[in-house]
Amino acid sequence: MKQDHRIRLTKLLLREAFLDLLVEKPVAKITVKELCEQANVNRATFYAHYRDLFDLHEEIERDLAHTIMRSLSTTLSSQSLSAFSNEICRIIVDNERSCQAIFGEHGDPEFPLRVVETLRESSIALWRRQRPDLPEAELDRLYTFMANGCLSVIRSWVRNDMADSPQDIARFIEKMTDSGLAAL
């Protein structure tokens, strides 16, 4: 049990140090040596848990994606656009440090797009229940438009230290989505 706790603590220290560094520079410019110094662990400890820095980066992204998908899958089934928007913002606030690094200047710009793509079918199904009269192609185009717009709003919100409340951002996303559905 103690070993499990030590492993979790070590991985947490490595993650936190890595996120701090990722806010400052791209992953390719971070060295294992500087990460270990910042986390106050030795290189052998790092390599006991990860192949390289990209392995750690992928684990952080995978964990965040899993958290997002697990949380949003329940919300999407609630058939409420408001609940969906609020849940997205809650997840971002709960994972602020990870999101600052991932949505920041040095994060992987493809990661949010991959997450958005996994939500496509569920989101379109939610909209289809609201607007069964709309053709599938229009709902698909609306999703592409709205998802990219929402990503830009969220990215800007995170990069500005989440100065607006999550409720304000959620309401804005909901209003824009409702407007998009109404315009069709």
Image (cartoon, rainbow, N blue to C red):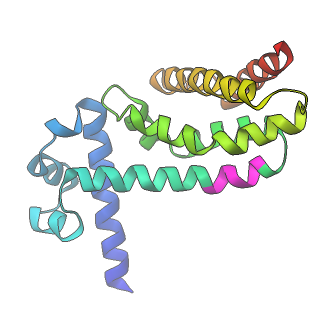
5 to the left or right of 135: left
Q: What stretch is highlighted in magenta?
A: 70-76
* Residue positioned most to the top: 183
Query: Residue 28, how many percent across, how many down?
Result: 17, 38
Q: Say above or below: 138 vs 16.
A: above
Q: Give residue 21's position: percent from left, percent from top.
A: 25, 39
Q: Nearer the viewer, residue 83 or 108?
A: 108
Magenta highlight on residue 57: no
Quarter of image, res 49: bottom left
Give the image location of residue 156, x and y in percent: 50, 20
Q: Residue at x 22, y 39 (%)?
A: 27
Residue 140, image x and y in percent?
68, 30
- Residue 71 on the magenta span: yes
Q: On the rendered image, what quadrant is the N terminus found in? A: bottom left
Direction from residue 24 to residue 117 in the image, left or right: right
How many numbered discs sit on the rendered protein? 0
Residue at 52% across / 42% down in the picture?
115
Where residue 81 sits, quadrant-wise, is top right
